[in-house]
Image: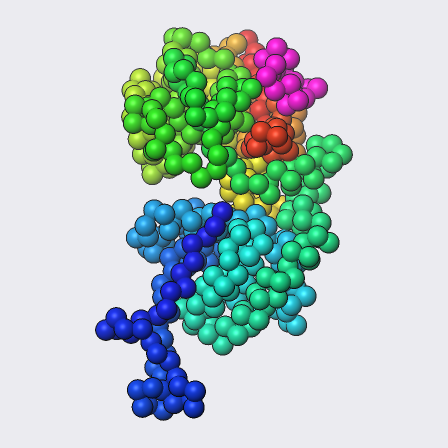
Amino acid sequence: MNIPSNTSQPRSRNGSKKTGPSRNGQARSGRSRAPTAPVVPDPTREIAYDIVRGVIENRRMLETTLGRSQEAREAEPRDRAAAHRLGAATLRHLGTLSAVLEPFLRKQPPEPVRVALLIGACQLLFLETPPHAAVGTTVNLLRRRDLAPFAGLANAVLRKVATQGATLLEGLDQERLNIPGWMWSSWKYLGPGVARRIARGLAQEAPLDLTLKPDVPPMEEGIVLPTGSVRFPAGTRVPDLPGFEEGTFWVQDAAAALPARLLAAKPGEHVADLCAAPGGKTAQLACTGAQVTALERDPSRLERLKENLTRLKLDTVKTVCADAAAWQPELPLDAILLDAPCSATGTARRHPDALWIKRPRDLAALIEAQTGLLAAAARMLKPGGRLVYAVCSLQQEEGPDQARKIAGQFGLKADPIRPEEMQDLPEALTPEGWVRTHPGLWPDLGGMDGFFAARFVKES
């Protein structure tokens, strides 16, 4: 991706070009010094800078920064999208970029300066931005952020990156560098070499996956995946696709579409999606003819869910703003889908900030919340009712460990997923009858998110 440059000649307030000093050091206007030229605003780099700083310095999610930033809200859609991609690319290659910069820095600069250098280096090494644009816009960014004393440092360091960086990359273990050490070690349970395959998948920008309504013919423009999802290249504008206004599809990663399918909801069954927003799984359940209740405790996320269901013309879904841990249906349910809140490490292709804002200590609270939701779900089910527990996490504690712990508790027994249910993705089926996907699968097709899913039945 080429990030647009913004290196045009600054102009004075009356619109004329700045002429600069003469050869003898005096300004051509006759003054002893030319006035400082204003730095041209650059929304793409400004917003990307805030995104990366939010993640690195405050462990703030990328989307949170975008939502809070007035500059991001006021930016043109093109600038906002470019900023998102630049910030995400910097986070995706964060370890590698830090290693490339290290030889050119005698000591670590202040963190805000380092962030600017990371963004500049990312443009040079991974986004094919012309050197003059990557260097110039980084220098201007520092000046606009009251960091002008470091402009010379940025200019010198990034020029070296432009000429020597590609050579340095050849000697780096990029896959290992771009994954936090604790996370890399935690993935060893998946098997030899899988952590490296995951890292290789995370280095690529995620494509766009769609789920089509059952009666909609395949889209000629996309690639139909083995599981039935339709894939488009990264950066595809969803509203521009045919059928968007008519509500014929919704955005949903191919792996995210599996848990609802495994619930096997039937027409007329009373089914609940307990953590429903943004609504992709709810839509899948509604398309089966089941009577679906969608729960979401966050009012803003519930509104987004409703908007999505309205566009899809799925008006039979009952939406409820409630905490699933305390909610109780009027009658016991036939089936429940619980895509529980988790560390979301499986979504790092789309949200590379997840790699850098999570810590091992964060898992304890998430696991406790998941266990509480599982207990609540069991209370909602009728005898013989089905439960699919899913998390978009690659962590053992949130997936296999939870499944083992829950089997036999709360009146739930394991209901292993059968090979014939996963014929289109057999490599994701585990010996225990669980489904485990990760970004290292389908490398030739563009990968997939990391999901874990296990199925249970409530005993009579």
Percent x, y of residue 143: 43, 71
Residue span colored magenta:
416-434
Tell me if residue 433 is in the magenta stretch: yes
The residue positioned 53% from the left and 70% from the top of the image is: 155
Extreme residue toward the front, this view? 23
Percent x, y of residue 284: 43, 20
Position of residue 32 relative to residue 352, above or below, is: below
Percent x, y of residue 61: 47, 48
Position of residue 34 relative to residue 37, above or below, is: below
The residue positioned 40% from the left and 61% from the top of the image is: 6
Tell me if residue 148 is in the magenta stretch: no
Q: Nearer the viewer, residue 388 or 57?
A: 57
The residue positioned 51% from the left and 40% from the top of the image is: 350
Q: Quadrant of residue 38?
A: bottom left
Q: Quadrant of residue 20?
A: bottom left
Quadrant (top left, top right, bottom left, bottom right) of the C terminus: top right
Q: Image check: 69 left or right of 362?
A: left
Q: Image check: 221 left or right of 245?
A: right
Percent x, y of residue 410: 56, 21
